[in-house]
Amino acid sequence: MSALRKLSVTGPPVVVSAGSLAQLGAEIAAVAPAFRYAIITDSIVGPLYAERLAGSFPDPTSVSVLTISAGESHKTRDSWATLTDQLSSTGHGRDTVIVALGGGMVGDLAGFVAATYMRGISLIHVPTSLLAMVDSAHGGKTGVDTTGGKNLVGAFHPATAIFIDSEVLATLPLREFQSGLAEILKHGIVQDVQYFADVVAELPGLLSQSGVSGDTLARLIVRSVEIKTEIVARDEREYGLRKILNFGHTLGHGIEAASGYSLLHGEAVAIGMCAEARAAERAGIAEAGTAEAVREAVCLAGLPTALPLSVSVERVMQLARADKKKRSGEIEYALPERVGRMAGRDSGWTLPLPDTLVQEVLQ
Ligand SMILES: NC(=O)c1ccc[n+]([C@@H]2O[C@H](COP(=O)([O-])OP(=O)(O)OC[C@H]3O[C@@H](n4cnc5c(N)ncnc54)[C@H](O)[C@@H]3O)[C@@H](O)[C@H]2O)c1
Ligand SMILES: [Zn+2]
């Protein structure tokens, strides 16, 4: 196991290491002492890692494992009901800590279970996808999707701590890894041009057979976590600044749902970032060249840059209108001024764009 890196972030402690999973139970018990632990995981991650994690607790008999079917289509109120019923029928009380072991889908769903079960119990995140490690496990947003759209029912419920073992990425499918790269690129675009350049330079290595060193990957994870948690610390409830993290997501969430979830979250966000950057440039908000820089990076990450023909632009717009990022009827977007700097400081970090322009860049 590599040395544990405890990040000095504002907010819950984040610990990054390679190979720590088999010791995490003891660490979790130390930061979140409890009578019982309920590991919530999915049908792909569970068989790979749940036993190892459960066995690492000082008292493995205090740990139960609850498994739901993998995939975004299971991030639903039904799964939430199944899990909360299972917790109560097996006698879990308020002295239970929920441990979310999985990608962002498990994290959001298990987080919402923790936020609501018995009016809220403690939560620990053990993210296993790149996307969850760098993004979804941080910042306290939890929730489920409804037929009306993504994450429409949820709560803010920050974890007590987040433990990242980057070695579990060895089993993550390449397509899922690339999906996580979309959020990493986003962190550079919204906040740190140097980091963006650094990530772009590492992309060929990150995607090659031989890969990059574990250290490079850990360094990128750490910087992304720093960027996200710094922004969240300044605006936890998303009244203003935190909205910059929604870059690519106003359209991205619509694209993801309109594709029937055949596009992964990061893929939809990648298309959303390209379209929103293009619209920002055409509207005179972003400097010339911004959209091309975003598109090139997305392309280099092996992510899609344009809407597939099978996804209807009208449906995307309809879903974007139903999304939360809307004010007095107009869709608001988090838009770049240039790579590393977002626009809209004086208007709460979002700006409206004419629907016709957005439809045009989505075509
Ligand atoms: N709460 C937030 O702030 C926030 C931020 C960004 C995204 N999200 C949400 O996160 C979700 C997307 O997260 P995701 O991309 O991690 O999806 P996911 O959780 O569905 O995981 C992707 C796939 O990879 C599998 N997997 C995960 N880790 C693995 C591993 N180590 N080895 C093998 N397989 C593994 C999963 O079983 C799943 O099939 C979306 O629901 C999105 O809305 C939330
Ligand atoms: Zn996202």
Image: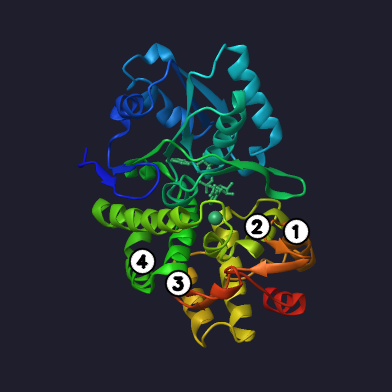
Label 3–label 2 contact, CB within 8 A = no
Q: Is mark 2 within 8 Å of ligand 1?
A: yes
Q: Is mark 3 within 8 Å of ligand 2?
A: no
Q: Which residue is mark 3?
A: 297
Q: Which amino acid type corresponds to the residue marked 3 in the rendered image? A: Ala
Q: Residue drawn 46% across and 74% down? A: 341
Task: Say whether marks 4 and 3 touch (CB < 8 Å).
Answer: yes
Q: Do labels 4 and 1 touch, CB within 8 Å? A: no
Measure the alpha-carbon separation of dots 3 and 2. 20 Å
Which residue has dot 1 on it? 319
Q: Nearer the viewer, mark 3 or mark 2?
A: 2
Please determine whether, in this image, residue 165 is positioned above or below residue 10.
above
Residue 39 image point, x, y percent: 47, 26
Q: Residues within 10 Å of mark 3 (few under 14, many from 20)?
A: many
Earlier-in-chain disc, 4 versus 1: 4
Please give the residue where the numbered disc 2 appears in the rendered image: 253
Task: Indicate which disc, 2 or 4, sits on the residue closer to the N terminus.
Answer: 4
Amino acid at dot 4? Val
| Separation (CA) of disc 1 from disc 2 | 8 Å
Query: Ligand 2 is found in which quarter of the picture?
Result: bottom right
Label whose residue precedes the other's in the sequence (3 or 1)? 3
From the viewer's perspective, is 65 left or right of 155? Answer: left
Distance from label 4 to label 1 (Cα)? 31 Å
Point out the tag, 4 or 3, that comes first from the N-terminus.
4
